[in-house]
Image: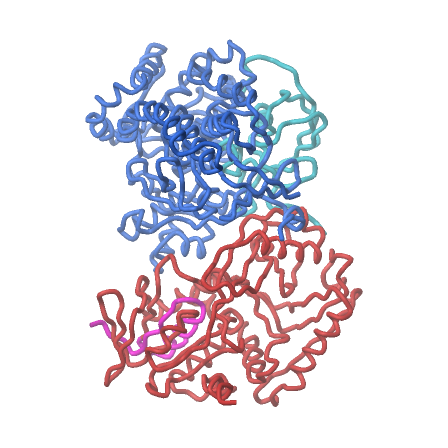
Amino acid sequence: MFKRLREGPTVTVTIDDVEAAVPEGASVAAAILLKNLGHCRTTPVSGEPRAPYCMMGVCFECLMEIDGEDNRQACLVTVEEGMKIRRQEGASGLKP
Amino acid sequence: MSERCALAVIGGGPAGLATATTAAELGVQVELFDEQSAPGGQIYRAIENADTEHQAILGQDYARGAALAQSFRASAAGYRSDSDVWAVTPERQIGVISFGSADIVDAQFIVIATGSMERALPFPGWTLPGVMTAGAGQVLLKQEGMVPDDTLIGGGVVLAGSGPLLLLVASQYLHAGVAIQALLDMTPRAGYLQALPHLPLALIADGYIGKGRALKAELRRADVPIISGVTNISANGDDRITSVEYDIGSQRQTLDTGLLMVHFGVVPNGHLAAALGVEEIWDRRQLCWRPSTDAWGGTNIDGVAIAGDCGGIAGARAAEYSGRLAAFQAACSLGLIDAEERDRLAAPVRQALKRDIRVRPFLEALFTPPASLMDNAVDDTVICRCEEVTAGRLREAVSLGCQGPNQVKAFTRAGMGPCQGRQCGAAVSHIVAAARGVEVELVGRFRVRPPVKPITLGALATLDVD
Amino acid sequence: MRAYDSVVVGGGLVGMAVAYGLAKRGINVAVADEGDAAFRAARGNFALVWVHGKGGGLPRYASWTRTSADLWPAFADELKDRTAIDAAYSKRGAVHICFSDDEMAEQQAKLEQVAAEAEPSNLNPGVEFEMLDRPALDKLMPGLGPDVVGASFSAVDGHVNSLMLHEALLKSFQDLGGHYLPNHRVLDINPKADGFALKVGDDEIGCNCVVLAGGIANAWLGPMIGMAVPVKPLRGQILVTERLNPVFEIPTSLMRQTGEGTVMLGDTREDVGLDEGTTLQGLRKIAANGVRTFPFLARARLVRSWAALRPMPQDTFSIYSRSRDYPNAFVVNCHSGVTLAAIHAEHLAGWIAGEDVVPGVEPFSLDRFDVQAAT
């Protein structure tokens, strides 16, 4: 849905195991929007898809699994080289 | 680890930066905590990275933030970026999470400057991917230099709602060469009439009215369709938005689009203050709760003051001024200056503040949505996004006898999700009030408790508190 | 003046269960309740249906609690049939976790004491428990931390969504013709020749029979009908995490995973008057216990915390008492509004309506405090 006004340096992350070059300094949520991935999570209530909404940390719609940690606010996390990003599917999958 | 500081400032926007810089200049030992990784807050987000080309897109008001960030960086104030404050106690203990570790900071004086957030106004389909706030669009532009990609959005972006920010985003997109399919102006026609009496005062405020008119004129020159008198928007789509519908007069219209950005004004981001127990009052003109403060931002909690928009919406410049006033009071309370000095320093700042906020009554009368917009959602509209609670379910709880948002929350789970009611809180109170046939201020609001930011049980378990 | 057969003062879990039970008996009942901002234990409940270990020192309390647990499955079904609200009642047993051999021995001794004091089987359907060592416990609930030594287990215990239970009671009550009166804080009760007049704001409501189920407010409402009620607030703080996929089915005395997937962690017992705030110390203590029990929960995020005031009778046991001065005035107090909801709706409401119930409520009378005062 989005494009960058100017190309700039990128870092490489994986999103759901697929490598992607994303802008250095961008938030994870912005990277998801830039890659036109549609949704970043499905809800634990009905399973419907959601995408970043406020981009400033107040709506908690952009929850994603980042480097193995569930339900992080993707709009408040800056991408880093090698970061592993996954869509959050439903509730946290934390296991004993 | 438990730490100490004389003055803790929470928030790195204009109010927080002005507070910290001013207090540091007066010799106060200051620490500023902010969840972002660079100073500026939302309004001046990523200001330190903005080159002239980027600033040209974002406009002159944005550039003002550069100087503010610069003087903050040059000051002796301590800066804790990437730090989420999840709790503040009446004993002035601050719970901070930073890069996964949880600290407690004991402060002698605290200034809360957590700014504003966009008013959440539920409408059918507002949870679909591809629907976001205009503020979100602005963050993407400031931080990442990202704009809507016309080739990926059938028909181009649609902007909808009311308020100065909507016009500003439209203008910024225009400068960036983005095609805007339409701007659906939902400002109630009555707003223009109500605002008129406030116009003379607004005209002598610092240039705001001229700017607003210039923005509109610019959009019209660029042939951006501005459709006035729009009501009842809804977003359609299956797993993402494909079209937006709206009423104009008695006619239902449809625009195909893959991106809808909405904006209904801003309200105080008062969650932290509320969780601390700061007394709030209902602001009828701004249609929101805001902390009850004295002339220095002081609250009912000893040694805790509020600065900037989280104390009531007044804009970025006013936030700076109120931040300075709070800093003078903090310095005085900490014994670095006496009351006479404080008042002497404050006098010109108060003058400037007074001049600046002359425009507010006009803007409030014009842009504040009528209460009916907050409470008329049809029954199957999702109100609580996190727990997916509909307007109908809320009304059902009221019909069982629930009198206010807290009992409604208990029965329906509205407000129990990760956002803790930040998004649905106002709408829930409005819907309950309307269903009961009483004023919003009578039904009250969600009780807020820490944590106001997520903290893991592991971090909490190892907290350094006695 | 509006008049009813009975008025229950207090619309929490205790008041609503009694009112529902009375309405089911065809009695014209009103519940006089406060508004949105009130001390509401019913909104802060931990929501266990808990039997094991209760009743030491008052055997009837053990019988009463066990009987309620036995009534619970049918009670849950009945409310679901009436309202379509599924309060997620689950009866798979519950454990009390011990972190040392001493704690195990202490818990075992406590449970054996309750069993030894137990009333005959016509009054108490049974006091069964098991002590589980670590291997036995691991089979029941994986993921426990290294500090856990074992636990006591009771098969009759369970848990429920207490908020949905509250809503189901409120709905059932009104469907039966009961009158729910919010914003009706009772300021005064005036006994009359033929009943009572309750002062509510500038208004009055009348009734033949009044039941005080006001929780901590019973302490000052009681004297209006000639009863001193020794009940005090005892604060409890509770944490709740984000929704997790199912991680443990069986609740512990301090942790349970709800039907929604959130994990609730309790609790504290603090004598702090009417202060219902949370504290960093309290939250830390609860989190530390949770992580010690289930180390994997260290990575779970806390979403909410709250505190509520338990209406705690002086000797911790229920108070069900008829006024000596006014035979149609009753006081009802307890701190286990969830566990006892079933028996409150069935037996307690029956007793108030004049039925004989087994086990009887006599041992719960306020008289026991007079005896204590006299010795």
Of the chain colours in the picture, the one used for chain A is cyan
Q: Is residue C244 above or below residue B284?
A: below
Picture coordinates of residue B358, whole percent (x, y): 28, 25
Q: Is residue B289 above or below residue B216?
A: below
Please state which of residues A46 and A13 is positioned toward the viewer in this rendering.
A13
Which residue shows up at 39% across the image and 51% down it? B405
- Queried whether the magenta region covers residue B452, the answer comes back as no
- Along the horizontal axis of the image, is C132 left or right of B295? right
Which residue shows up at 57% across the image and 77% down it? C70
Picture coordinates of residue B38, whole percent (x, y): 57, 25
User: Is residue B34 visible in this depiction of the protein?
Assistant: no
Of the chain colours in the picture, the one used for chain C is red
Chain appearing in blue on the rendered image:
B
User: Is residue C99 visible in this depiction of the protein?
Assistant: yes
Please state which of residues B31 and C81 is positioned toward the viewer in this rendering.
B31
Q: What span is in magenta?
A: C1-28
Picture coordinates of residue B27, whole percent (x, y): 52, 28
Q: Quadrant of residue B168?
A: top left
Q: Quadrant of residue B100?
A: top right
